[in-house]
Amino acid sequence: MAAQRRAGPGGAERRRPAGGKARAGGTAPGRGWTLRGAAPGAALLGSAVLVGGLLGWSLPGGLQGGAEVLARGSEAVRDRFVEVACSGDYGAGRRFEGCTPRKCGRGVTDAVITREEAERIRSDVRRRIQEKIAQTFGISSSAMYLTKPTFFSRINSTEAKTTHDEYWHPHIDKVTYGSFDYTSLLYLSDYAEDFGGGRFVFMDEGSNKTIEPRTGRVSFFTSGSENLHRVEKVRWGTRYAVTISFTCNPDHGIGDPVLT
């Protein structure tokens, strides 16, 4: 489909569908946001509120500060990793030697999955992401287990019909899902080319850190409260991604998911 580029805020280019306007809501095909496995319930926790299966956090003003882009959609990132101090979330239960995080942080790479492989969703994608996470955090790949929910998401600018469609709330994966120790996302569409908005945002004290999706890009991080995050609302186009999550507890492990 023919497309136009137009400078966005700060001079950054973005591509819009031919014919002019970026989709501002309600003009794109309906959102399908499919979750393989239901999120467990969670109690009200301080300023946290459960919304549609995601634990949304009411944040102080300092957490809404300026943004720093960790990975731009226009660049090819070989390997990038930012270490952050581990939270206490991993000490509350059993520790699994060789897997439970002792080093925490967030990484992004365009070198694990090729664009062609991302488009085909080849069967070995999960294994290769798992090995990359294990290598980065210095743990044993064999000690990691795929856990639920692992899901495919398709998000566009259509207004949310229920709270379950409200994907943009800040949350912590380990608090929301319980079993998560490591979270990864495989992006299947390009920021500013296929959609506007929809960036992944780590919410740090005083400064947000954003990742711009790119087809074949993998971002991954430890799942505790050191990595509070959200996804910006998609303004136009369609954003595709696969969330692949891992646990150290074999009791919470699942088989490879089937994408539908």
Image (cartoon, grey):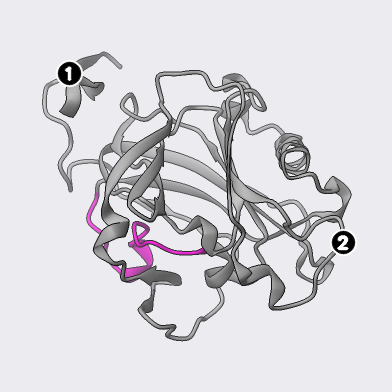
Position of residue 13 measured from the top left corner of the image (x, y, whole percent):
24, 19
Would you say residue 60 sits in the magenta stretch?
no
Height in image: 155 above or below 163? above
Residue found at x 34% / y 57%: 168
Q: Cβ–Cβ below 8 Å for labels 1 and 2?
A: no
Q: Say what secondary structure mark 1 lies in.
A: strand
One can see residue 186 in this view:
yes
Residue 227's label in the rendered image is none
Dividing the picture into quarters, in which one does residue 173 lie? bottom right
Q: Say what secondary structure mark 2 lies in.
A: loop
Principal SS element in the magenta part?
Answer: loop
In three-dimensional space, the C-alpha distance between marks 1 and 2, rounded to whole angstroms, equals: 51 Å
Q: Which residue matches tag 2? A: 97
Height in image: 198 above or below 54? above
User: How many discs appear?
Assistant: 2
Would you say residue 163 sits in the magenta stretch?
yes
* Region in magenta: 158-172
One can see residue 38 in this view:
no
Q: Which residue matches tag 1? A: 6
Instruction: Count neighbours of disc 1 (C-alpha within 10 A) and say few if under 14, some if 14 to 19, many if 20 or more.
Output: some
Position of residue 260 measured from the top left corner of the image (x, y, whole percent):
58, 48
Dividing the picture into quarters, in which one does residue 11 lie? top left
Farthest residue to the bottom: give it.
43
